[in-house]
Amino acid sequence: MANDNDPVNDSGASSTNGQRESSLVQIPSTLSGAFTEETSHSKSSGEADRSLLLSRARDFLHSPHISGQDLFSKRRFLREKGLHEVEIDVLLRDAPTSAPLIPPRTYPQPAPSNLPNLLLGLSRIFSWLAGGSAILIFIYYRFFLPRIASSFMARHSLKNHHLTLMRRLTTSLSAFKETQAEAWSVLPKADPWRELTPYSKCASTDDISVSYGDQEIHLDTVSPVTVLRCGLADLTKGEENQQKPTTEELFRYLEEKFTWLLSPDGLKYEQRLWETLSTCPLFSADPPFTLAASQDPQPPSRWSYAPPLPPDPSLVVKALSSLKLALPKNSLSKPSVFQSTLQAVSEFTGYISTQVYTPYRAPSNGVGIASNLTVVEEQLRREIRALKGLVLNRTTFQKTASAARLCNLRERKQTTCTISETVPLRSKYRELNMEKGAVTVKLVDDVQRNAIANTIGSLNITFLGTASAQPSTTRNHSSLALRLGADVWLFDCGEATQHQIQKSDSVRMGRIKKIFITHTHGDHIFGICPLLASCMNGAGGTTEGNEDPRTLTKSIHPPPVEIYGPIGTRAYIRNALSLTHTNLDGTYVVHELRFPTDPQQGDCTALSQCPYELEGRNIPQFKGLWENIYSDAVVSVSAAPIHHSVPCVGYVVAESPIPGKIEPKNYLPDIKRTNTPMSVMRQLQQGLSVELSDGTVLHGPPRRRGRKLVILGDTYDPSPITPLASDADLLIHEATNAHLPKIDPNTKTTDTYELVEERAKSRGHSTPQMAGAFAKHIRARKLVLNHFSSRYPGDDSESSRTIMDAIGRLAAEKYGKEVACARDFMSFDVVHSNQ
C-alpha cells in the first residue's frame, strides 16, 4: 500500500491501482475510475488536501451503488487510495447500509393495450360471467344434482313398483278367468253406450232441447247415442221399416235440428257421431255397413235403433253366488289352487280399492307420465272396478258381509240391491244407505294393521276375568283381552265381561274385532250376547207400525265381529239373541271348529239365521289340528283340541316374521359413497334389497321369528296342542286347584297333593305343578297362571299375595323359571325374545 505522501497519479501507482481495480468484482468500474482520477489529479498538483480526499471518499461510500457492497471490499479499496485505517473506520461507520438493489428485468414490458374502453369493459364483464358460471356449475354438481338424482330414482322406483303391481294383477286376473270363466262372465262391466239419466227418457230431438233449456248443448253432456236415437225416432215416426233413414239423411236432419252441430267445415261432431253410429251395437244398418274396398258401388245403408236389455239389479250378488258355486266340491274346507287364486285377487283388491289406476308410459328419458288409456288398459280398468265391489274372504270364499243382511232386507221390505263400484273405499268401515227400497253398499276388505310393515307393533295382554266356575268379589268370570296395535281380540267372554271392559283403562269396546271361545261352559260364554248388544247398539225392537230408525237413516258400521268357538257357539248366540228379541245395528259371523265326532254341516239349531248374522264356516280338523283358522299379513291364529270335561280348544296366536336388527355401520359406507338418501335405511330395515346408483345391491337383514302366544281354556291335559305351542313366548295356563298346607286356611288336613291333583283332573282342571310341567315341555319363555278357584282371592291384601306367591312357587318347581299369577285387570306387553 502506498504512503499518504506518494503521488496518487504516479504512473507506477496508477498501473498498480488499475490492476487491483480489475480484481474487485463487487465495486463498479465507473465509480472506481472516477474516484481514482480525482485523487490522482489532486496528488499531481501537489496540493494534497486531506479533507477533500476524505470528503470524496465519504461521497463515494454514500453512493447508492456502493452502499450495498460488502465491507471488506470497501475497506481494501479505500486503503489502496491512501486512507488510513482510522479514517477508513470513521468513514465506514458513518456510511449508510442499504439492501441490495434488485437487478433490472431482462425481458421487455408488455405494450399498453390500444383497445377502446368499451371493449375493455365488455371483456371484464364476460370474464366475471365466466367465473360466476363456473361457481354456479360447481354448486349445481356439488349440492343440487345429488338431490335431483335421488328424486329421479324415487320416481323411477315408483313407476317400476306400479308396473310390477299391474303385471301381477293382470296375471292373477288371467288365471282367475281361466278357472272361473263362467262365474267371471256375470261380473258387471262399464257400459260405454249408457245414456245419461236426464236424456235417457227423451223420445225426440225436441225433448232434448226442452230438457236442456236455454243452456248450451254439446256432446260432453248429451250422449251421442241419445242424439242419434232421437234423430232416428223423428225420421221413422209414422213410416215403415223400409223407409229407414240413410246416413246422409240422418246427418242432414241433425244439422237442421241442432245448430250447435254446425261449423264452417260441416258438422262439428260428425266424426264422433259417425264412430258411435258405426260401432255401437244398438244401431244396425241394412244392408250391413262395411269398410272393405270394392269396385262396385255399395247401396246406402239404412239405420235403425234397438233399445238395450234392462240391467239386472242384483248382478253383483249373483256374481258372488256364482263364484262360490263355481268352486269344486270340498274347496271351501281345504286349500286348493282355486283358493290361492281367490286369495291373490283378494290381496290385490285391498290395495287397488284405495288407488286410482293411471297408466304409466316409459319414454326414452325414463320418467313415467300419465297418458290416455288404450283398449287393453280400459278393459283392465273395468275389471278393477268390478273387483272393487267384490269381497273375498282371505281364508275361504264365503258369502260377503252384506249379502245375507241384504237378502233378509229384500224379503222384509221388497228392496233391490245395487253395489256401488265407483266409490273408493277410504277407511275401515262399511256404509249402508237405505232410501225407499234401494240399498247402496260399500264393502271393504278385512281390518288392516300396518300390513305394509308386516308387523303388529305393540302386543298387550289384559286379564278381564281370572275366576273359575264361581266368581268372587275380586275375580270375574273368565275373559282375556289381546290388543294387537289398535284392535282387540277377546278370548272367552264370561258373565259381566262388558262391565270389566268399562272398568278397564286399556280395553275399548268399540275396538273388539274378534272373539275366541275355548268351550261352551257358562263361565266362558254367558257374557257374549250382552257384549254384542252393547257393541252394536242392540235394541228390543219397535212397537207395531213403527220402523226401526236404524234401517231408515244412513249409518256407519264396523266390519262384522268374527267369533270362533267349538260346536254349539253359533246355536247359543242365535238362540239367545232371537229369544230375547235383540236387534243389532251391526253384523257378526260365527266360525265353528268341528271335532271329528261332530256333524260337519249344519248349525245345530232349528232357528233360522238372523238378519244381522252372516254365514260362517264349519272348520273341520286336519291331522288333529285347526291350522290358520285366521291369517293375514301380520298374524295368524291356529287351534287344537285340549282335554276337558266338554269339547275344548286352545288357541295359538303367531306373529309373522318381523324385520331383523339392522347394523348401520354395514351400510353407511356404500350409502355415503354413492350419495344415496338415508331414507333407504327404512327399506333395508324391512328386509328389502336396494340397488345403489353404481350397481351395488344392499340386502336388508334376515327377518326374525315373531312372537307366539298360547292361550288355553280349561284343561287337565293340553298335550294335543304341543305341535303348535312349542317355543312359545307366552303360555297362559289354568291352575284351578292347588295343595297349600299351612298357607291356605281352607286346605283340608286329610288332603295330599296326589288327592288334590286327582280331584282336579276328575273335574277337567289342572294344578300349578301340571301347568309348570307343560310349560317346560313346550319350552315356553314365560308362564302366567289363570282360572283360579274362588278360594284364592285376587286383591292386594297380604294374605292373598302370600297364597298367590305360594301357587307361583309350586309351578316354578316344575317349570324352572319364575311364574306369574294373573288377577283381574293385570296388563303387560309381550316383547320379542331378544328383548
Image (cartoon, helix red, strand yellow):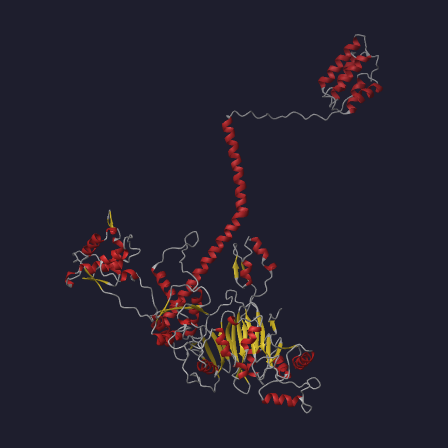
Percent position of residue 237, x then y: 17, 61
Percent position of residue 389, x then y: 39, 68
Q: Quadrant of the C terminus?
A: bottom right
Q: Quadrant of the N terminus?
A: top right
Q: Quadrant of residue 410?
A: bottom left
235 to 262, vertically: above or below: below
Q: Is residue 808 left or right of residue 134?
A: right
Q: Nearer the viewer, residue 222 or 624?
A: 222
**Count of residue discs:** 0
Work out whether residue 652 can be spotted: no
Identity of the residue drawn at 52% across and 85% down: 647
Percent position of residue 539, x then y: 45, 76
Work out whether residue 574 can be spotted: yes
Q: Quadrant of residue 54?
A: top right
Q: Nearer the viewer, residue 535 or 758?
A: 535
Q: Is residue 609 left or right of residue 833?
A: left
448 to 36, vertically: above or below: below
In the image, farthest residue toward the bottom: 750
575 to 443, vertically: above or below: below
Q: Nearer the viewer, residue 242 or 505?
A: 505
Percent position of residue 328, x then y: 38, 78
Q: Is residue 486 left or right of residue 170?
A: right
